[in-house]
Image (cartoon, rainbow, N blue to C red):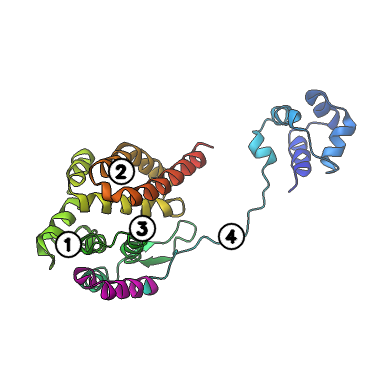
Amino acid sequence: MTIGERISERRKSLGMTQEELAEQVFVSVEVIKAWEDNQFLPEGSSFARIADALQISGRDLFEMDAKPSWTVKDRMFSESRMFTRLKTIAQMEKLEQTWKALSYAQTMHSGALRKANKFNPEIEVPYIIHPLMMACHAHALGIRNDEVLTVILLHDVCEDCDVKPYELPFSESVQHSVALLTKHDGQSLGDYYDGLSKDRTAAIVKALDRCNNISTMASAFSRKKMIEYVDETEKYIYPLLQKIKDDYMDYNDPIYVIKYQILSVIETVKAMIMQ
């Protein structure tokens, strides 16, 4: 529907004549006819008066009904390609725990699915996509530490697969970082973030985890959950990013990119929610 057609339709639904609309908008009847016949668009100074006269918002008046024929992707990258990429990296860079963690995480998360996006709620994708994407992201940012990549791959295993951190067949430091990333029942968010912020591995993994979740939340989260996520991010994640920058200076470059990604998505989501 064009703007002219929308003006005409809304005017008629109110039982208003072209003459009456012209009088309220302070233009001639000929101008109203020209608008409705799509001969030219209203000038900017007339927008607010037209909306007021037609008792609708400017956005409702001037937004087109037609939606773009876009498809919201169910996944950004192929899990099989990410798995192969990480296997190759682990082998070439001799990352022994990462190599082991890939197969372990794949086995533990086997059959676990997550909703792909709210536009196609019947479609689910393998949960393993999340830690694989995080690990690929970390490596691309220059994080090549075997322990960090291992913790990334295992960070949801305890919470989702009913495994205790001390039962993980990995080093004690990996177990410790995973334990800090696993939120316990009744644990406050303040205590949770305070604990993990004191461990350099847990801290950077949490930053990567939030960056990945935020990157896809517009298509997967409800409006309520997005608001909650924005609030939590501003209250806890921003201070965490600053602490990593201050205390773990070798992560300055990755944190710069991660912070940019998080901030840009959060501000975009806030603008969408507030419209």
Name the residue rendered at 39%, 74% in the picture.
81
Q: Check disc 2 and report the residue beneath it.
A: 241
Image: magenta residue range:
81-99
Q: Check disc 3 and report the residue beneath it.
A: 141
Q: Judge by depth and name the residue closer to the eye, 167 or 186.
A: 167
> Of discs 4 and 1, which sits in the foreground?
4
> Of discs 2 and 1, which sits in the foreground?
2
**For numbered disc 2, what is the local secondary structure?**
helix
Q: Residue furthest front?
A: 250
Real-space Cα separation, disc 4 to disc 1, in angstroms: 39 Å
Real-space Cα separation, disc 3 to disc 4, in angstroms: 30 Å
| Mark 3 closeness class: few <14, some 14–19, many ≥20 residues within 10 Å | some
Q: Position of residue 103 (x, y in %)?
A: 24, 74
Q: Amino acid at mark 2?
A: Leu
Q: Judge by depth and name the residue closer to the eye, 239 or 225.
A: 239
Q: Amino acid at mark 3?
A: Leu
Q: Check disc 1 and report the residue beneath it.
A: 162
Q: Is residue 159 above or below residue 95?
A: above
Q: Is residue 149 above or below residue 220?
A: below
Name the residue rendered at 20%, 72% in the picture.
100
Left/right of residue 189 with respect to residue 28 in the rendered view: left
Real-space Cα separation, disc 3 to disc 2, in angstroms: 15 Å
| Mark 1 closeness class: few <14, some 14–19, many ≥20 residues within 10 Å | few
Q: Amino acid at mark 1?
A: Asp
Mark number displayed over residue 70: 4
